[in-house]
Amino acid sequence: MFNRVKEILTAPKKEWAVIAGESTPHAKLFVGYVLPLSLIPAIAAFIGYGLIGYSVLGVHVHLMSWGIRHAVTQWIVMVGGVYITALVVNLLAENFGAKKDFDQAFSLVAYSYTPMLVGGIFYILPALSLLAALAGLYGLYLLYVGMQPVMKAPADRNTGYFIVSLVLTIVVTAVLSAVMAAILLSSFFL
């Protein structure tokens, strides 16, 4: 796993060629790769918001309940995001001349989430949490570069496939995030 993380982050084009030749079932990839890496942002969010805390208008806040809520939210958003994005990428595949294969779509998305999952360590200091989101931008690049070799997207349709997948994923993720935020805020006031 550590070698895969290093290679996808440092030599993505070469690593996508290797990944394209694999046929790992999504359940195995979830348990062996996504689950362990998704614990990084979850644990960091727990420590950052529950133990270390942050300042709001000069008042230092750190509540164990906030830490737990942020950890659970981070984990659900990360894992849910991988599955939702994989579903979108797979559902759109044939419309863009790509090969429809959920396991391959899941591999593509899981590995392209690597920067955001690893970057989740920045949640340990809430003031640096923006850096975790910025790491996700590199993940978008990884997704774009990986679509052609992993999903067998034609070169001339790869950009459109990426953009439509991204837009639909943003819409679905925005709805998921709004629901999670509503749950988080409502549970805070209970």
Image (tube, rainbow, N blue to C red):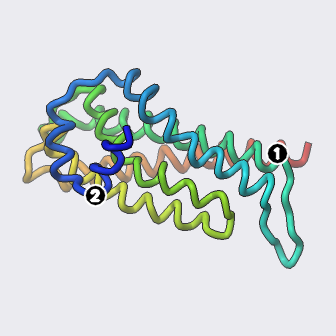
Seen in the picture, residue 49 relative to 190 is either above or below; the reply is below
Task: Give the residue at x 86% y 78%.
Answer: 58
* Residue type at the position of mark 2: Thr
Seen in the picture, residue 56 relative to 87 is either above or below; the reply is below
Task: Identify the element where label 1 is drawn.
Answer: helix
11 or 178, which lies in front?
11
Relative placement, left or right, of 66 versus 20 is right
* Residue type at the position of mark 1: Ser
Quadrant of image for the N terminus: top left
The x, y position of residue 12, in whole percent, is 23, 53
Residue 88 occupies which quadrant of the picture? top left
Q: Which mark is residue 10?
A: 2
Task: Give the residue at x 32% y 43%.
Answer: 3
Task: Give the residue at x 31% y 35%.
Answer: 107
The x, y position of residue 152, in whole percent, is 12, 38
75 or 90, which lies in front?
75
